[in-house]
Image (spheres, grey):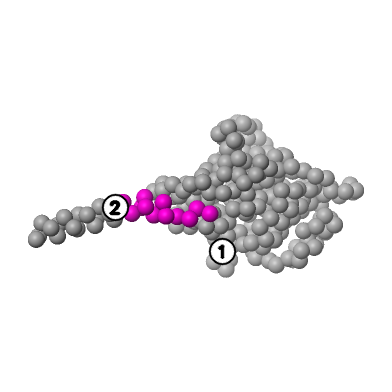
Amino acid sequence: MRNAHKFILALILALGLAQPAWSAQAIDGDELLRTIDRNLAPESYESYRKLINIEPDGSKREYTLYTVKKGQDRIASVFLAPTSDKGRATLRLGENMWLHIPNVGKPVRITSLQSVTGGIFNNADIMRLDFHVEYTVEGVEDKSESHLLRLKAKTREVAYDRLEMLVDKQALLPTEIRCLAASGMLIKTLYFKKPTDFGDGFMRPAVIETDSPLHKGYKSVMIFAKVQRRDLPDEVFTLNYLPRVESLRQ
């Protein structure tokens, strides 16, 4: 009888040791991705960002933007600095993007693969929608202290065909995202750093850095500040409102 008890205990321990692999299989990837989106930002919010482009010789160019977002796919930004760019404003509605330039008649259409700041971040990075809006989860792998999410773009209009997102299991926030072309070629890697409490218990990485094997020696950095919930009227996210986005600052 004692030997039978030992056998049962050993069997229970063996099943327990196998639990992490089963847990990873049981994860609802799309639900996990929605949770990551909400941990990165409230659905509607305002924020300030500094974008820094660093060239191989160490020279830098900096931009300061004020940004507002509403719902899953509406985002507007205005440049506050440098002086040469002040007043330029961008609007994204789903897959459509526009750039407003002061003293120029109509906003011009821009694409996700262009960049309003130059550097490694493109417009899709700077005006990013929730990940679950653009990607489906093809798989979740257990990587010890992280989940590895393999994401596939829902349409051809999305900037990157695939993403490999490494997510901290405790914080449920990304630590690294590899952005891939349909061919599997690595386009760039995003590194999420410096977890910061922005108030009301909302914590997320304050810094995103990126580099690319296609632009060796170049690096871009995005620094977030004053990320906070804010409800905004629908009229803010229209072409007519673009010249007035800066008036939203409180």
Q: Is residue 175 visible?
A: no
x%, y% of residue 148? 47, 46
Residue under circle 2? Answer: 17
x%, y% of residue 154? 62, 46
- Residue 150, disc: none
Residue under circle 1? Answer: 202
What is the chief secondary structure element of the magenta stretch? Answer: helix
Mark 2, other Cα within 10 Å: few <14 / some 14–19 / many ≥20: few
Q: Secondary structure at mark 1?
A: loop
Q: Secondary structure at mark 2?
A: helix
* Observer-nearest of 33 and 55: 33
C-alpha gap between disc 1 and disc 2: 34 Å
x%, y% of residue 162? 57, 41
Q: Residue at left 71%, top 52%?
A: 94
x%, y% of residue 160? 62, 41
Range of the magenta residues? 18-30
In reply to whether residue 23 is colored magenta, the answer given is: yes
Label 2 near label 1: C-beta < 8 Å? no
Dividing the picture into quadrants, the one containing residue 191 is top right
Quarter in which the N terminus is drawn: bottom left
Three-letter amino acid code at the position of disc 2? Leu
237 relative to 29 in the view: left or right = right
Mark 1, other Cα within 10 Å: few <14 / some 14–19 / many ≥20: some
* Observer-nearest of 142 and 90: 142
Q: Earlier in the sequence, mark 1 or mark 2?
A: 2
Q: Residue at left 28%, top 54%?
A: 15
Q: Residue at left 70%, top 40%?
A: 113
22 relative to 216 in the view: left or right = left
